[in-house]
Image (cartoon, grey):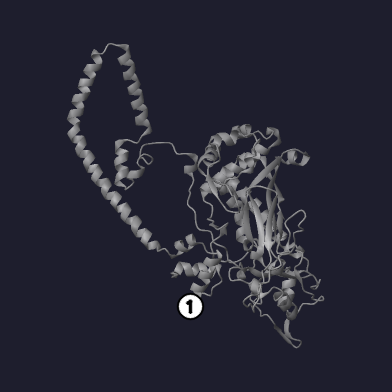
Amino acid sequence: MLIITKRLKSWAVANLGVDQEATDDDFKKSIGTALVEGELTTEKYAELIKDPSADEADEFTKRFDRLATGIENIVTLLKEDEEKETKTETKETETEIKETKTETKETETRTEQKETETSVSETEKPTRMAKMIGELGGLSEMTEEKTVDIRVKEAVEQYDSTRKSMTYPNTTKSGTPHPLAGQRVQDFGRSIDEPSQCDKALAGAWAKFQILSATPSLAGNTQRAWEKLSDHEKSLLGYLAEKSDWDDSKDNKMNTRKGYPGGIKALVDDGGASGALEAAPIVFDDQVITTPLLYGELYPLVTTKPLDRGRRVEGVETGTVTAQWGGVDDTSIDLFDTTSYISAFDTTIYRWEGSIRIGLDFLSDTPIDFGQHVTSQYGERLLEDLDDVIAVGNGTTQPEGIVNKSGVSLVAWGGATSIGNYESLRFGVAKAEHRPNVKNTAVFCGTETSYQRARALPVGASDARRLFGMDYDTYALMERAYKINESMNDTDVFYAILARYRMYRRKGLTIRTSTEGDTLIRRNEMLIVAMARYGGQLERAACAALTVTAPA
């Protein structure tokens, strides 16, 4: 029997399109269907019905028990110290007498070795007082690592690592209402947080290392690039290579691994031979992709798949099987004709490139400022380009856009804007395609001019009131969002279910640089070119309807 909780209901409203005011039976029906069809995994279901207060109570009990145990241990240790103090002094005296009488070199050598080992051991481990304080705080299981003894902080510890949950804003960057306003930002099913100061510093160190490694004067030598970094930046990069998460996406699933394979030595000594700079730490990629995720018109609504390698994705798509009524005994069942039932769904991966110029003096700035600048620059450039290819990509040098998808239902407008034309476009996509889990991604898309013409339709020839109302800032039409893309022609308007657009993304930006040329030298600047790889196309032509005869 399905258990319905508030968290599960919230998930169903956000992901299955269930009405907030629906009955429990409606929620159970939608959730049951999602479980059967795989849209909701059993692990996710178990997580959503779990009571978080129970975990909190259990964790409080455990910490209280550890605190009580720690206090008891300290009392016991103090008593033992008092009892053993006299015995210890006696033993030390006897040891000194014995060492004085010892004359052989072999005994002296062993004594020196033992004293050295004791000194090293005492240096590496926390003192007894540090352990007592650790136990008093209820951290007895971590006293070998957490200590009050004096030590020098690593570079990464000098930055605040606090993160806040990242949610979609109320509007996109162009000012139109965001379809996911207020919801948690997701990437490959993983919640994204706002980058902390520590994240920005790590991203800055990585970006600077990539840029120096790609500088022509260093001939792609990562060892020489490493030498150009400050000690502070080297420490940050070392932490990044040893302890941070790196992308290891495989089989269309987002995976992470702890640290770069082989650690900092493998990264620095690579020399570009094995493509070390093709890999990227997640903390850097997340900050670059955050801008398109947050503010994009179209990209946040499409289905994104991770890729670990390759320039072409070979997949398949299937048609719909048929069946019939009227079967009786002693008659054969008609076989379904599988001709064209399975067809190829191949997607080519294309390279995206963006470039910026940065002053050479700016490279000496702190990693946190540099990381913020570089990731925001790449993100803003990527924001516009991704939306453009989803709408009008040519499918030859870039992902295929909806406007250029073969087989999309074409609707003739005859050069006029009317409510009937928009209805023909809207109902050019069958109801069967509007499943609950994708319904919220169904949108109109055109230029600002096309939207203005639609909202300017009057109620009648002698009635200047607007047919679709006066709430222009909603950027919506017929209960569907109206997305703006200025790379489209005014004559083109489409209606599509964007969740049926599949975008493949290769994780990891690679960077090339140049300081050559009259302009760069005179301006004391470096040209930085960032490269990423994407491929995409609409899964089925039936998920979109298009007109190319709207008013020019």
Name the residue at the bottom extreme. Answer: 462
Residue at 61% across / 59% down in the picture? 293
Residue 513, percent from left and from top: 70, 41
* Picture mark count: 1
**Relative vertical location of residue 374 with respect to residue 235 in this rendering, above or below:** below
Residue 483, percent from left and from top: 68, 68
Residue at 58% across / 42% down in the picture? 205
Q: Nearer the viewer, residue 370 or 120?
A: 120
Q: Nearer the viewer, residue 246 or 500?
A: 500
Residue 451, percent from left and from top: 72, 72
Tell me the quarter of the picture where residue 104 sits.
top left
Residue at 72% across / 69% down in the picture? 448
Q: Nearer the viewer, residue 430 or 155?
A: 430
- Mark 1, residue position: 23
Can residue 525 be spotted in the picture?
no
Tell me the quarter of the picture where residue 474 sits.
bottom right
**Disc 1 residue type (three-letter):** Thr
Classify the position of the N terminus by image quarter. Answer: bottom left
Residue at 35% across / 55% down in the picture? 59
Q: For numbered disc 1, what is the local secondary structure?
A: loop
Residue 161, percent from left and from top: 48, 49
**Relative vertical location of residue 23 with respect to residue 232 in this rendering, above or below:** below
Name the residue at the front extreme. Answer: 330
Q: Within 10 angstroms of label 1, few (less than 14), some, or many (20 or more) residues?
A: few
Classify the position of the C terminus by image quarter. Answer: bottom right
Can residue 142 be spotted in the picture?
yes
